[in-house]
Image: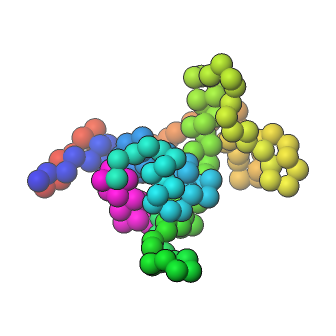
Amino acid sequence: MAKVVRGGETCAIARTVDVLKDPWSFLILRDALSGVTRFADFRASLGIATDVLTERLNTLVEAGVLRREEYREAGSRTRTRYQLTPAGAEFKTVIAALQQWGDAHLPVECGPTVARVHGKTGAPIEVAFVDARGRRVKDEDATFERTAAYPAAAVTVVT
């Protein structure tokens, strides 16, 4: 079966989208970043079908975003929990940026359900571009420049 690679294999966005695949993966990451680790807890939180959850967790494990870890509670059988890897933990910024955009452009009447705050001070924080010196860069001043590695074709079919 041929695999369609959106934007070519060299495009980081295309490769990331290929891992995350659909909204369920983003929601699994959101829950994992909030401390959810057990299959049953993901299922209860998301209301997701068991087969879909299994497939998404497997994909996130294969991509190195989550890792399986065996655990056993007293008097119970051995079970598996899913822990974020360092690469998975780095999705915090991505998930926060999605939330920040949604709060700004798709607000709900009751207001934001999660506040982004500094863990030590409790002060509000937001996702932003920063330069090498740690100074904030306005969104309109941030540009994306294509390098020589940028794919020439928009869609490549790999067989």
Residue 149 shows up from this direction: no
Above or below, 1 relative to 68: above
Quadrant placement of the C terminus: bottom left
Residue in the image at 60% along x and 31% along y:
101
Residue 67 shows up from this direction: yes
* 98 part of magenta stretch: no
From this viewpoint, which residue is outermost toward the top?
A: 109
Looking at this view, is 158 or 133 the one in front? 158
Q: Residue 39: name its quadrant.
A: bottom left
Residue in the image at 60% along x and 55% along y:
33
Residue in the image at 60% along x and 36% along y:
99
Q: Specify whether 58 is left or right of 27.
A: left
Prevalent SS, magenta region: helix
Above or below, 90 relative to 49: below
The location of residue 71, given as percent across then percent down, is: 51, 77
From this viewpoint, which residue is outermost toward the front?
A: 75
Residue in the image at 62% along x and 22% along y:
108
Above or below, 79 relative to 120: below
**Which residues, given as a range, are shown in magenta?**
51-65
Q: How many marks?
A: 0
Looking at this view, is 109 or 11 the one in front? 109
The scheme the figure's colours follow is rainbow
The location of residue 27, given as percent across then percent down, is: 49, 45
The location of residue 6, given as percent across then percent down, is: 29, 43
